[in-house]
Amino acid sequence: MDKYQEAFDGIIERDERVEPRDWMPDEYRKHLIRQVSQHAHSEVIGMQPEGNWLLRAPSLRSKQVLLAKIQDEAGHGLYLYSVAETLGISRAEMLQQLHDGKAKYSSIFNYPALTWADIGAIGWLVDGAAIVNQVSLQRTSYGPYSRGMIRICKEESFHQRQGFEIMLHMANGTPEQREMAQDALNRFWWPSIMMFGPHDSDSPNTGNAMKWKIKRESNDELRQKFIDKTVPQAEFLGLTIPDPDLKWNEEKGSYDYGEIDWEEFWAVVKGNGPCNKERLDHHIKAHKDNAWVREAAEAYAAKTEGELV
Ligand code: FAQ
């Protein structure tokens, strides 16, 4: 075996981190660029459903908190684009792939946020699901991605609490507020558990991801963790999870759950969800409208280049 491959295998086997300076197989690099760039796009596109509620937040406090959360998501996008750049792809190229429909972003952000309770459900369920996935990714084999995840997770746990707090208020509010909270849970439950991706048996990328320790737990393992952790929270809120097959399995020590609608999942992933077109159009428009910012930054960098060295 060639000595470069041997050195790489050794890093993975010893559970050390692969750093940008290290040799890595092309397939490992490509796999990471795909996952990390899609992760970055998710953070940035994920700002849209929430941004839609900034001007309608019901109090100054809730507006400040939501604004801070959305700004955090922008920051997460920036860390992740920077991680992908260390693998040899430019941000412009990643954005082009997004705009051309070649790069994906999480299916969950193609659902609309119709009421204030949806902002609660997004924080509670969507950030809740994101944390379960990202806590596991803190131990991913690529150093910059792993370190980025450690920082991101600290912020995500605040986001999850922000959402749970909204749900708690609404679930204990007027009958109409309670109904809105239940309705938000009804609409966001299934899309949230779809975030973890297809079942392991239908997940083409999991094999290599586990072999290279990019993923430390599989899609189904993480989905199960999320469900087991979230059901008692729904019970605490006095809300009902919209799954008649959800049942504690004493033997397994976890919940059994109903059939996921994979047809809906793949329709959304392939661009036919309720908001896919709106989300992408908005991103493309913002990118074009703000071209002057990039041009100004580049001109400034070119001007100061000589002065800095
Ligand atoms: N949506 O073989 P697998 C957040 C695609 S961050 C769309 O299982 P893999 C924070 C998958 O890309 C949320 N596409 O793939 C926030 C692949 O297609 P490809 C994002 C999906 O990579 C909160 C194909 O299906 N988090 O929410 C989805 O091993 C609130 C086959 O799937 C991350 O990205 C999906 N849900 O596993 C922000 C975490 N699932 O690429 C704002 C990092 C699967 O071959 C507001 N990513 N696909 O053409 C991962 O952990 C993994 O990439 C998975 C998918 C688990 C998402």
Image (tube, rainbow, N blue to C red):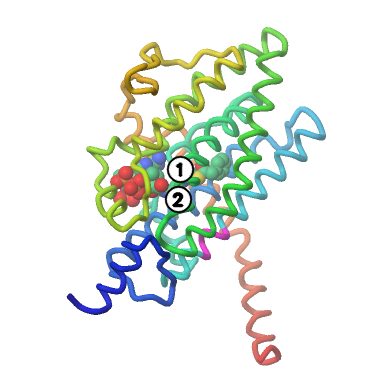
What residue is rendered at 63% in x and 24% in y?
117
Q: Is residue 303 above or below residue 283?
A: below
Membership of 110 in magenta stretch = no
Return the residue found at the far top: 175
* Residues tagged 1 and 2 counted as in contact (Cβ below 8 A): yes
Mark 2 CB in 8 Å range of ligand 1? yes
Q: Is residue 73 above or below residue 293?
A: above
Q: Is residue 299 left or right of residue 214?
A: right
Q: CA distance from mark 1 to mark 2?
A: 6 Å
Q: Secondary structure at mark 1?
A: helix
Q: Is residue 67 left or right of residue 226?
A: right
Front residue of this view, candidates 276 and 263: 263
Q: What x and y, as percent, mark residue 252?
A: 33, 23
Q: Is residue 182 left or right of residue 201?
A: right
Amino acid type at circle 1 is Asn
Mark 2: give few (<14), some (14-19) or many (20+) Cα within 10 Å: many
In the rendering, which numbered label is found on residue 133? 1
Q: What x and y, as percent, mark residue 170?
A: 68, 18
Amino acid type at circle 2 is Leu
Q: What x and y, as percent, mark residue 67?
A: 72, 43
- Give residue 169's quadrant in the image: top right
Mark 1: give few (<14), some (14-19) or many (20+) Cα within 10 Å: many
Q: Which residue is mark 2?
A: 137
Q: Main secondary structure of the magenta part?
A: helix
Mark 1 CB in 8 Å range of ligand 1? yes
Quadrant for ligand 1 reads top left
Q: Which residues are magenta?
A: 78-82
